[in-house]
Image: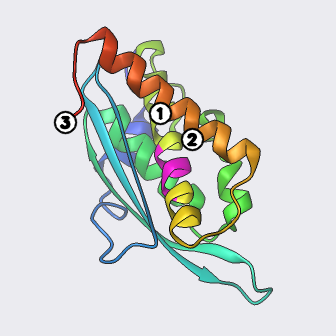
Amino acid sequence: MLYSKKLLRLFGEEKNFGKIKNPDGMGKVGNIRCGDEMWLYLKIEKNKQGKNFVKDVKIQTFGCVAAIATSSVVADLARGKTIDQALKITATDVMKTTGQLPKVKIHCSLLATDALVEAIYNYLEKNNYKISNDMEQKHQQIIKKNKLLKKKFGIKDN
């Protein structure tokens, strides 16, 4: 299956690319198997109800067309949402926006949502907010997945 026209259009947009100076949260994830790496930066503010929300999101993604497009979609989906709403964004939500991905590229949408989870985790941790059990489990699963990939490919941490 080829990439959809929608995904290719999203890939060509550059509105979410870049880095936020002094981000409130930053998530870095990668997939050693395919070589994709994503950095997702968050700027968090309080809304009128006093809840923390995602004011801005920027991404730096190094990888294939699907990795770049899905990380940009995650940025679009998260912007303007409260932290709790942003954490509910799934790979299925991403693929509804991009159109169907080739089976070998579905992992890109998972990687993009992992980057968002890690950025929010980083924000909560830096600001001494209580981290829910669910959030901690997601964070630990991402760490475990990365360790397994590193072990499989014989990569040692520095």
Counting from the top left corner in percent of width and height, residue 149 is at: 36, 18
Q: Earlier in the sequence, mark 3 or mark 2?
A: 2
* Of marks 3 and 2, the one in the foreground: 3
Counting from the top left corner in percent of width and height, residue 16 is at: 37, 62
Neighbour tally class for label 1: few under 14, some 14-19, many 20 plus, Cα within 10 Å: few
Q: Work out whether 90 lies above or below 4.
A: below
Neighbour tally class for label 2: few under 14, some 14-19, many 20 plus, Cα within 10 Å: some
Q: Which mark is residue 158?
A: 3
Magenta part of the protein: which range? 115-119
**Amino acid found under the numbered disc labelled 2:** His
- Residue lying furthest left: 158
Question: Decide: marks 1, 3 in contact (CB < 8 A)?
Answer: no
- Residue lying furthest right: 49
Neighbour tally class for label 3: few under 14, some 14-19, many 20 plus, Cα within 10 Å: few
Q: Earlier in the sequence, mark 1 or mark 3?
A: 1
Question: Decide: marks 3, 2 in contact (CB < 8 A)?
Answer: no
Secondary structure at badge 3 equals loop
- Residue lying furthest bottom: 48
Secondary structure at badge 1 equals helix
Counting from the top left corner in percent of width and height, residue 122 is at: 49, 59
User: The N terminus is located in which quarter?
Assistant: top left
Mark-to-mark CA distance, 3 and 2: 20 Å
Q: Predominant secondary structure in magenta?
A: helix
Question: Decide: marks 2, 1 in contact (CB < 8 A)?
Answer: yes
**Amino acid found under the numbered disc labelled 1:** Ile
Q: Is residue 129 left or right of residue 3?
A: right
Mark-to-mark CA distance, 1 and 3: 15 Å
- Write the residue at 50% across / 68% down: 126
**Amino acid found under the numbered disc labelled 3:** Asn
Could you tell me if residue 134 is visible in this image? yes
Give the residue pinned by disc 1: 143
- Write the residue at 44% across / 41% down: 70
